[in-house]
Amino acid sequence: MMKAATYSPAPATDESTQFVSAASLRLRSDWFIKMRWGAAAGVAALTLLAGEVAHIPLPREPILATAAVLILLNVVYAVRNRRVAPAVIAHELRVVKVQMLIDLLLLTVLINLSGGLENPFSFIYVVHVLIASLLFKGRDVYQVALFSAVLFSFDILGEHFGLLPHNHLQGGGVLTHAPLYMAVSLASFWLVLFGCAYVGASIMRHNRTIKNELVARQRQLVAADKAKLDFFRFVSHEVKTPVVTAQSAVEAVLGVAGGEMSAKAAETLRRAVRRLNQALEIVKDLSDLTRTRMSADRDVAEVNLSRLVGKLLAEQGELIAEKGLVQTTALPPEDLVMQANETMIEKIFDNLISNAVRYDIPGGALRVSLLDLGDSVRLSVADEGIGVAPEDRDRIFDEFYRTPAAKEMSALGTGLGLSIVKRFTEQLGGSLQLDSTPGTGSTFTVTLPKS
């Protein structure tokens, strides 16, 4: 099965070049809000358990008041996120940074109220630094790490020198109050904190570098794609008129003096007409290719698919009769109608039917079926022609590619028809399937939504 692939990358906007967008950062902000509810509930539960179960003397009221402040602020954050849509990433970063700094202040208050250096939960500062490294760029990450280290150090030193009250945890040893122990603990704390900041910032810096490279390459692809389409437009516009003029002139000469020419001269002119017809097909296909930028929801009209299939088969009638093809057509009992861009639908159907006729073997079967699937329609075109080799199945949808078997069977053909089919099918929200066996034929199936 072969699905239509995306044709061209979407343009890279300024916001898309950021490692996070305003919208994705808002999602993370909402996640922080959920974490704060759990943190506030955990503080309240641990405080009650410490007093009632473990009989650890803690200042319950100040701790619960701090948790209440956290809850109140979290309500403000939640309301703000609901009422203010994410728009500018710089503004969202500032808001998240302010929230994180307030969280660190409240965390320091809780650490002070619950033992300071004796509290085993001081490692939570590290969690904040790791989260900051996922959100901010290098300098901002180190600012959060510095702010955390300064707050914790101020609390420990403030308690030691009597600037802040110390709430002793029951069972806390004398060692935790020794200057050497405090110095080693703070040094270890600073080392771990900034080590985490460095590791996190380095990983994210590497990821941002990869993202920047991808964005740069995407922009190059978009520019190359635009240049290619501009060239196609120029060629289709500038070449069509001289080709048609030359074709008309040669046909006029054949019509007026063809009978008086030698057989060799007349055949040379007829061969020139065939080549000019091929050139005209290329120009028309190039013109169609430049329409791959058209929007599928523009010029939407009611398209009678049953009549369209009949018209396209009638246009191929002369070649069908010349090759002696056995034609089988299966259409719904009533006309099948859909709302779509008529030009795109006609190009899809025309290319599939004309290809089947062109590459079918003399006397082979040509089967065209149209099926109503309710919400979608399905066109299937089958032949008993040259088929498609496995190694060519991906490439036949590339621009200008023709399989060796196709070139051997017919010198005519541009290699653009299936590329147009694939791209128009994709833009209409449909899918394209190929079933083929070399030497026995191919079946192309297009499924399209009705609206």
Image (cartoon, helix red, strand yellow):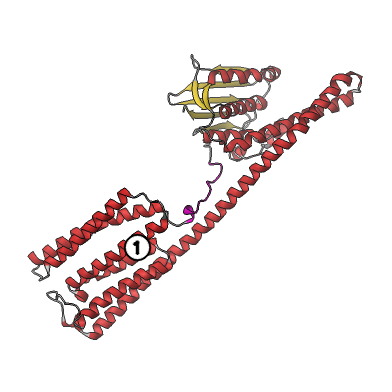
Of residues 443 and 46, the one nearer the viewer is: 46
Q: Is residue 375 magenta?
A: no
Residue found 10% across the figure and 71% down from its top: 57
User: What are the residue bounds of the magenta stretch?
Assistant: 6-17
Which residue is most to the top?
Answer: 333
Q: Position of residue 165 (x, y in %)?
A: 16, 77
Residue 319 lies, with reference to residue 72, above or below; the image says above
Name the residue tied to disc 1: 97
Q: Is residue 16 magenta?
A: yes
Of residues 365 and 202, the one nearer the viewer is: 202
Residue found 19% across the figure and 62% down from its top: 67
Residue 306 lies, with reference to residue 91, above or below; the image says above
Residue found 26% across the figure and 55% down from its top: 76
Residue 20 makes an appearance in the image: yes
Residue 97 falls in image quadrant: bottom left
Q: Position of residue 118 (x, y in %)?
A: 19, 75
Q: Position of residue 77 (x, y in %)?
A: 28, 55
264 horizontally vs 109: left or right? right
Q: How dense is the environment of label 1, judged by Cα within 10 Å: few (below 14), some, or many (20 and up)?
A: some
- Name the kind of residue labelled 1 in the image: Lys
Residue 413 makes an appearance in the image: no
State the predominant SS element of the stretch in magenta.
Answer: loop
Residue found 56% across the figure and 21% down from its top: 368
Q: Position of residue 8 (x, y in %)?
A: 56, 44
84 horizontally vs 368: left or right? left
Residue 361 falls in image quadrant: top right
Secondary structure state at the residue bearing disc 1:
helix
Of residues 363 and 173, the one nearer the viewer is: 173
Of residues 216 and 65, the one nearer the viewer is: 65
